[in-house]
Amino acid sequence: MLYHESDPGILHNIYTSPLAPYTVPGPALIAGASSSVPQSSSKVTQPRAARLSLGKLRLLQPARLRLPSGAAVVVQHQRRPQPDPQH
């Protein structure tokens, strides 16, 4: 048998308060190795908002919409065909 239920770390109740210290079961992986690793902190920054450029946007016909609260609106813009400069 690899482990016995009486070995440290095999039976551990995570619902006790305060939580009892946890011992990793089994022998050390590397003789003489540290059982803990020093921790360091890092700075977390909030990303900047992306910019969106639509150029000149013009409504051909004004529209009034009644939307329920929280509804999203998706606007699709189609470019008009440009005249061919060779004609």
Image: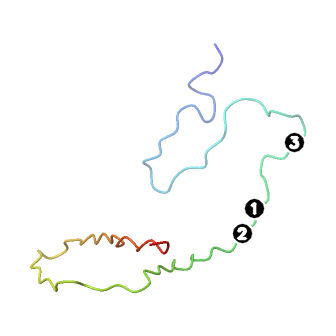
Mark 3 surroundings within 10 Å by alpha-carbon count, few (fewer than 14), some (14 through 19), many (20 or more): few
Quadrant (top left, top right, bottom left, bottom right) of the C terminus: bottom left
Mark 2 surroundings within 10 Å by alpha-carbon count, few (fewer than 14), some (14 through 19), many (20 or more): few
- Identify the residue at horizontal 90%, vertical 40% (top origin): 32
Residue at the extreme front of the image, as rendered: 87
Estimate the x, y position of residue 12 in percent, counting from the top left: 52, 39
**Mark 3 against mark 1, which lies toward the viewer?**
1
Estimate the x, y position of residue 17 in percent, counting from the top left: 45, 55
Give the labeled residue for mark 2.
41
Q: How is the image coloured?
A: rainbow
Name the residue type under label 1.
Answer: Gln
Position of residue 25 relative to residue 80, above or below, is: above
Residue at the extreme right of the image, as rendered: 32
- Identify the residue at horizontal 49%, vertical 57% (top origin): 18
Position of residue 28 relative to residue 2, above or below, is: below
Give the labeled residue for mark 3.
33
Helix, strand, or loop for circle 1? loop
In contact (CB < 8 Å): disc 2 and disc 1:
yes
Give the labeled residue for mark 1.
39
Mark 1 surroundings within 10 Å by alpha-carbon count, few (fewer than 14), some (14 through 19), many (20 or more): few
